[in-house]
Image (tube, helix red, strand yellow):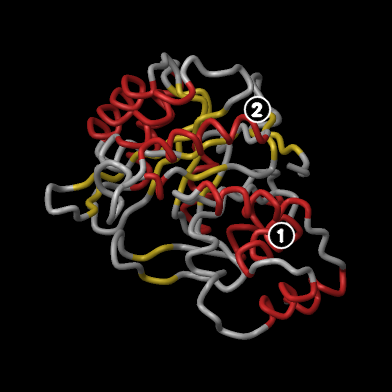
Amino acid sequence: MNTQEITIAAESKHPLKVKRFGYGTMRLTGEGIWGEPANRPEALQILKQCLQSGINFIDTADYYGEDVTNRLIAEALYPYPAELVICTKVGGARKPDKSWVPFNRPEDLRSSIDNNLRTLKTDQISLVHFRVLAGSGVPFKESMQAMFDMQQEGKILHVGVSNVSPDELQTAMDMGNIATVENMYGHAQRSSITLTHGGETRGGEEVLAICEQNKIPLVPYFSLFQSMPKQDNRISTIAKKYNATEAQINLAWLLHRSPWILPIPGTSSLKHFEENLKATEIRLSEADMMFLE
């Protein structure tokens, strides 16, 4: 894998250096982000291949499955190498009918953190994103304060936020150190949209600008999922130029778009995993980037 490093929480006492290309585990679950993977051996092999390929940033959540991806990570990679950063999310939960619901009262967040610590078999989680879901009724600052409280207790090393608006990001930064932001972002998705689960999903360019100004890595989720619908033929044109797939060009575009973007493409296919890795070897020219803009 040919990619640069990025530093998370660079000005803290415990900065984390990771390769600027991670892996998101959500697709390792069963259909509907629920239950065990269709091919468990392949799922475990993908996680092992992450380390063998140089990836040392893995994104997960205890509501993937439920608890499926955390248990797979522990089974495949525990005891964890010192350079591995496992990032999890709290703030949401799943009902038995597979619906997504907010789970962001202080006691809910504490319960989620304790569950993540147990399933990941660790005493401290390196990075935790508080995921904002619509309709919770809990003030944003109240949830964030609970996150910072658990950081003070040592359960969380670094606090991040996910699915935040520019105003929410600024509020969080005013309350404490924000290590990373995990928002939807991709070539064809740079503004807010509404998903079938989780309500409004906040994007885009305004949040990226704040991240760049404050040297905060932006971890884009659904970058391929939302980028694949063909709104125009620019991606396919560049893909043909480099004899690459459109997914690879989407990832290459993210890597070139800003040095503060840390892509985490996910897949349940080892073949697609290897294809995604090859995106790090594509060098888009300035003319390519201007064409894609």
Residue at the farthest left position: 96
The image shows residue 238, relative to residue 140, as above or below, that is below
Q: Quadrant for the C terminus, please.
A: bottom right
| Distance between mark 2 and mark 1 Cα atoms | 23 Å
Q: Which residue is rendered at x = 19% and y = 53% of the image?
A: 98
Residue type at the position of mark 2: Leu
The image shows residue 145, relative to residue 258, as above or below, that is above
Asked whether 136 or 77 is in front, the reply is: 77
**Residue 64 located left or right of residue 174:** left
Q: Which residue is rendered at x = 71% and y = 51% of the image?
A: 213
| Quarter of the view holding residue 248 | bottom right
Residue receiving disc 1:
252
- Say whether disc 2 or disc 1 marks the residue closer to the N-terminus: 2
Q: Nearer the viewer, mark 2 or mark 1?
A: 1
Q: Quadrant for the N terminus, please.
A: top right
Residue type at the position of mark 1: Ala
Q: Which mark is residue 16?
A: 2
